[in-house]
Image (cartoon, rainbow, N blue to C red):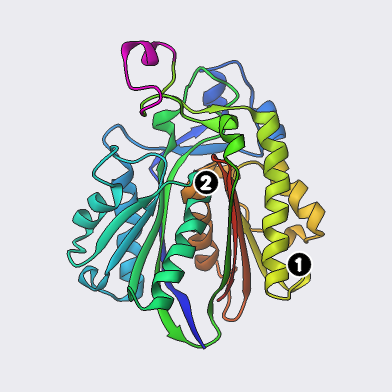
Amino acid sequence: MYRTKIIATGSYVPERVLTNFELEKMVDTSDDWIRSRTGIRERRISAESEATSDLGAAAANEAIKKAGMKPEQIDLILVATITPDMFFPSTACFIQDKIGAKNSAAFDILAACSGFIYGLSIADSYIRTGAFKNILLLGAETLTKITDWKDRNTCVLFGDAAGAVLLRGEQGEAGILSTHLYSDGSFSGLLNLPGGGSRNPTSANTVRQGLHFIKMNGNETFKVAVRSLEQACRDALSNNGLDASQIDLFIPHQANYRIIQAVVSRLAFPLEKVYLNLEVYGNTSAASIPLALDQAVASERVKTNDLILLSSFGGGMTWASAVIRW
């Protein structure tokens, strides 16, 4: 059988750590409040000089090195991000230049926190049709650059990171078994960044109103997130004739511990089989799953022939899932 296989992973996080105790000095919040509602203790903050492409290039170079490849062998770069270096050119083009992948096509994917799994689906389709052979897929974000540090409901949530995977078609049972993508634009008002696009072009007024920062209706987003993650996971399991007990590792989007807890409970999924790192990285949007996957591989939480379930939700609203045999 011919499948799209992840042949290497990589990740990068900025050096600076921002703890809940530091946030207590910046906004009306507390370590107890943050941890009890989100499960987050600290997050990484990119330097002023670091753009999303810098984080992405570092993660990409690590994956390329692990794969024993040359950048010139990559023929497509996909970057899932909601914090591009600029509207255009794409962040994928900047990363292409930084890593020297001169023979690749490159474009960005805008699906918020679901972007990485959307990218897996796109890459899988391209590889199965023979359009591309070696694909570099990244989730890379500098969310702290679009965070309102006066809004205690959002500033406690987000962090910066990048994760990367190299994908190639190979014979065998290992690889992507299925991907499942969903969206519902009627929920677009729950989580967005209203300023800077054609709806609210950048102006002194949009800056004054703080429209260039993340806006979120936390309570409603929570409800939609739990329902959508459960649906995506059940569809992925059903499509592959699996039940939760057969999954070796579940890597959910690392947004909020209470959301993950609710989904795991509904699926009757053992918490010891769930990979969690949001305590130290927070919500890194599209970078969340590839960062966790790279760390799971490095810590030997993932073994040959393991079945891995991925699931995410994000602004749009979008949600997605995937099943991979390692």
Magenta-colored stretch includes residue 278: no
Residue at image location 30% in from the left, 61% down from the top: 61
Q: Earlier in the sequence, mark 2 or mark 1?
A: 2
Give, as a three-letter code, the residue at label 2. Answer: Cys
Asked if one can make out residue 182 in the rendered structure from this viewpoint, the answer is yes
- Could you say which quadrant of the image residue 168 lies in? bottom left
Residue at image location 39% in from the left, 31% down from the top: 145
Query: Does 65 sit left or right of 234 as displayed?
Result: left
> Which numbered dot is residue 180?
none
> Which numbered dot is residue 244?
1
Residue at image location 75% in from the left, 48% down from the top: 261
- Could you say which quadrant of the image residue 326 lies in? bottom right
Q: Position of residue 242 (x, y in %)?
A: 73, 74
Up the image or down, 296 lies above or below 79; here it is: below
What crowding class fits label 2: few (fewer than 14 Cα within 10 Å), some (14-19), or many (20 or more)?
Answer: many
Asked if one can make out residue 257 in the rendered structure from this viewpoint, the answer is no
Magenta stretch? 198-209
Give whichever of 175, 126 is nearer the camera.
126
